[in-house]
Image (tube, rainbow, N blue to C red):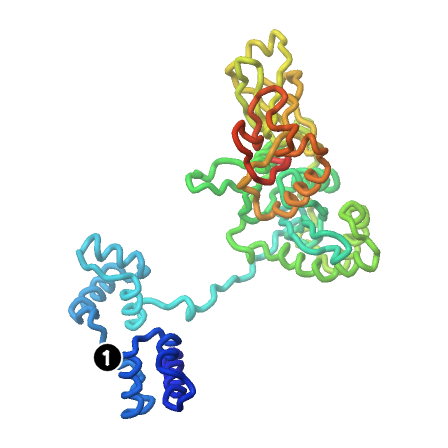
Amino acid sequence: MSKREFDRLEVLTDVRSGRLRVADACAVLGLSRRQAFRLLRGLREGGAASLVSKHRGRPSNRRLSAAVRDLALALVRERYRDFGPTLAAEKLVERHGCAVSREALRQWMIAEGLWVDRRHRLPSPHQPRRRRDCLGELVQIDGSEHAWFEDRGPPCTLLAFVDDATSRLMGLRFVASESAFSYFLATRAYIEAHGKPVAFYSDKHGIFRVNRKDSTGEELTQFGRALSELNIDILCADTPQAKGRVERAFGTLQDRLVKELRLAGVSTPEAANAWLPGFVEDYNQRFGRAPLNAKDLHRPLSGQDNPDEALAWREMRTVTANLTLHYDRMMLLLDPTPHARGLARKQVEVVNYPDGQFAVRHEGEALPFRVFDKIATVAPGAVVENKRLGEALAYVRAQQAAYPANRRRGAPGRTRPPNNLEAPGMPARKGKRQGVTSTLHAP
């Protein structure tokens, strides 16, 4: 019996014993009086078995005929043996006019051994990959958001650089979130300490790979473009198991490093970054191994390399006829020099450095500018990456608390901008728009 049938039996038993009225039983079961009396009569004459549905064990009236089933399976065996049920059902309709639902075809294919249900498939094997031979030939990189300081501080992200040949920690850095600027700073520190590796090995995060559906695979992210300028390759792993050295390192770090930070009394990312070199040295002595080839493939920076300019965020912007351009929810005003006057309607490059400074250039020449006094805002519903959500919310709270009353959104003194220009998130002329806004400067 089903749960519904057991519930009916319990209620009807109470009716027969006089503990419940028929009207109340109808309300509990959602039945009419006539249906309730019919069930009571069946219970009296046939017992609890009379409450079991008479359709159970009988074929459905809407069941497809055996001829349709045989035709569909014959076509699948002959032409679509390696097709999944969804695609096979689509092709049966498109090419043969055999209309069969995906679920019905799936059940038939499972019964005939043409398809294996996901729950019964064997797990995909991830066989070990041979280590690279030399130090610096392949360096696995990744970030892990974790409560590294337990309850002594907020969660943050640890960026790790693990050499594939030796499993050594080549670099660790605590950052607020896993972002392009965080990797710019961490990569700069890595290159200064060890030199340029042959290649980095990462996951498919948007920092390392363009993940648009229409991507051709040749586009470069900002981090990929920076590595290309420094003559460093970036490779993306298909699965987490493919970059298992850095994944296993994080498993060890989330145990050992958390406890070592507790014993050392470190509770801030800044103090942790200063404390990390000693921990890295001890870790490498315990868990590192010698490479198969003693040659170090790290390369020093050449005269053509400029890490300051390479490890920066670069975007193109169009100069308006008024010699202005927009970047990161700010308006930049170019000084009206003879060179700048000739750039109206032309493209210039905005360079944003990890230290917060930025520059405007045209064909390598810096253009003097000033920032228009305009509050950059995050509109309600703005898209924030999952790995940056904690940092974004913390920044929002800090900015809301820091604003004086006359600079807060919706305050009476700011019903219109002082320059009579529309600004994002400002209340309209008629009525007020409710919402939470704040400022974020990182792209």
- Report helix, strand or loop for mark 1: loop
Residue shown at 30% from the left, 78% from the top:
33
Q: To which quarter of the image does residue 110 belong?
A: bottom left
Residue 290, how many percent across, how many down? 71, 56
Q: Is residue 41 left or right of residue 431?
A: left
Task: Name the residue type under label 1.
Answer: Arg
Q: To which quarter of the image does residue 87 belong?
A: bottom left
Residue shown at 61% from the left, 34% from the top:
410
Badge 1 crowding class, 10 Å Cα cut-off, few under 14, some 14 to 19, many 20 or more, is: few
State the residue lying farthest toward the left. 67
Residue 276, how many percent across, how many down? 78, 50
> Does any portion of residue 129 appear in the rendered image?
yes
State the residue lying farthest toward the top. 338
* Front-lying residue, 79 or 177: 177
Q: Is residue 420 left or right of residue 98?
A: right
Residue 164, how many percent across, how many down? 64, 52
Q: Is residue 214 left or right of residue 225?
A: left
> Does any portion of residue 208 appear in the rendered image?
no
| Residue at which label 1 appears | 58
Residue shown at 65% from the left, 17% from the top:
369
